[in-house]
Amino acid sequence: MSEREMVFREEVMHLFFHCEESYSLFSGDFSRGRFGGAGLQMYLLSLELAKDDSYKVYWIFENHPVDKLVYPKIEFRNPISPISRGIPGISRTINKQRIKMTYACEGIPILMSTMAHKAVRLRETTVTVAGKSVYRCASDADVTQPFGLSDAGSAEAIAAIVASDAVTVQNDFQKNTLLNVYGKESHIVPNGISLPAQPHTGQRDIILWVASALDVKQPWYFVDLAKRFPENKFVMLMPCQQKLIWEFVHRISKDVENLVLIGEQIPFEQTKSLFQQAKIFINTSFVEGFPNTFLQAAAYGAPIISLSVNPDNVLEHYGFGLCADGDFTEMYEQTRELLSDVNMMNTMRASGLVYSREKGDIRKSAIELKKILVSINEI
């Protein structure tokens, strides 16, 4: 057996994570960028895998300093050097650290083969195992191309799906679409969060919305909803991502007295207090994968009302929310009904707690990811 073959058969599996937006979760420095759902999942999964002595976890941040980052059992690297950066720099770093798997996300060029030095442009998440790759669909948009073939993000997602040796998805819709449209088998690795030890029993007095300022999130609908329920307090956490959207929502919300707009990123841990105060959580997105905010709302006992997003009909199937199927008038009626029916609200709250413990535990998500990494490594 050659030295290279021995490296890839050693007991400890070396893992390389790459997602620039996860940086602020480690550093606490939100001046260098926001984090979204993909970045949060990458961060949480890396923490879980780092707890397992069978894995050695590395993070690489190409656009951020890493010298002050310290986290138990995780090492940080920056691939920039005087002679190489980008894919060459990442390639050198991966091979130097004897990385056999890579987990990377965001719309960036990433390394697809740590041994053969083959690279393609990918979007969202990819795992590379000794030259083999596993692509993770982060949104339904990755498989449906709702914005058309000309959309760069969709094109990169399709390239990743076609090029990958395996694909992981978040829900049955993505899995079935990949099979029917691309003839591609895939594996479900659901999103997860770290669950609270005990259910929240304190006062709930806000209607909550949490997402970035993006057109696909359609935040203006939440402002409109707040206007229709002036007797209720609405809170909106909306860090800036698309400046025009952020400025527009700020402008139209100025005169809505019952709406509090938090327009900056806050640490993930601090969002828990908002969900604890929420009597209803509102989602107005046009398309998503499986929102992390659904998991947070369910875990902290906030019934969900969603304008359009309802992966695998999860809200009605498990009884912790309602979906308006894209009809804002229906969303208004659902909100009005829920606010007036305490029994319905309590039933949904209890159902959400059950769902989060059965389906939303990040530890279970990490186990599913490990199964795939191991199976790819054995091929």
Image (cartoon, grey):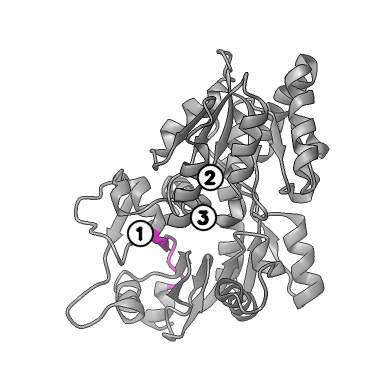
Residue 248 placed where, x, y %? 49, 49
Q: Is residue 211 magenta?
A: no
Callout in the foreground (1, 2): 2
Q: Give x and y (percent) for residue 9.
A: 46, 70
Q: Of marks 1 and 2, which one's residue comes earlier in the chain? A: 1
Q: At numbered mark 2, what does the secondary structure look like: helix, strand or loop? A: loop
Q: Is residue 102 left or right of residue 210?
A: left
| SS label for mark 1 | strand
Tell me what residue is drawn at x 53 percent, y 64 percent: 125
Q: Image check: 107 left or right of 146?
A: left
Residue 233 figure quarter: top right
Determine if residue 197 is in view. Answer: no
Taking the view exactly as shown, the residue that stands out farthest to the front is 255
What is the CA distance from the residue labelled 1 to the residue labelled 2? 25 Å
The relative height of residue 199 versus residue 63 in the rendered view (above or below) is above
User: Which residue does the numbered mark 1 point to in the structure image?
Assistant: 59
Q: Earlier in the sequence, mark 2 or mark 3?
A: 3
Per the image, the residue denoted by label 3 is 38
Image quadrant in which you'd find residue 205: top right
Position of residue 61 relative to residue 307, above or below, is below
Q: Nearer the viewer, residue 108 or 60?
A: 108
Residue 15 lies within the magenta run: yes
Q: Residues within 10 Å of mark 1 (few under 14, many from 20)?
A: many
The stretch of residues the image draws in magenta is 8-20
Which one is earlier in the sequence, the residue at label 1 or at label 3?
A: 3
Which residue has dot 2 on it? 211
The answer to which of 234 and 368 lies nearer the viewer is 234
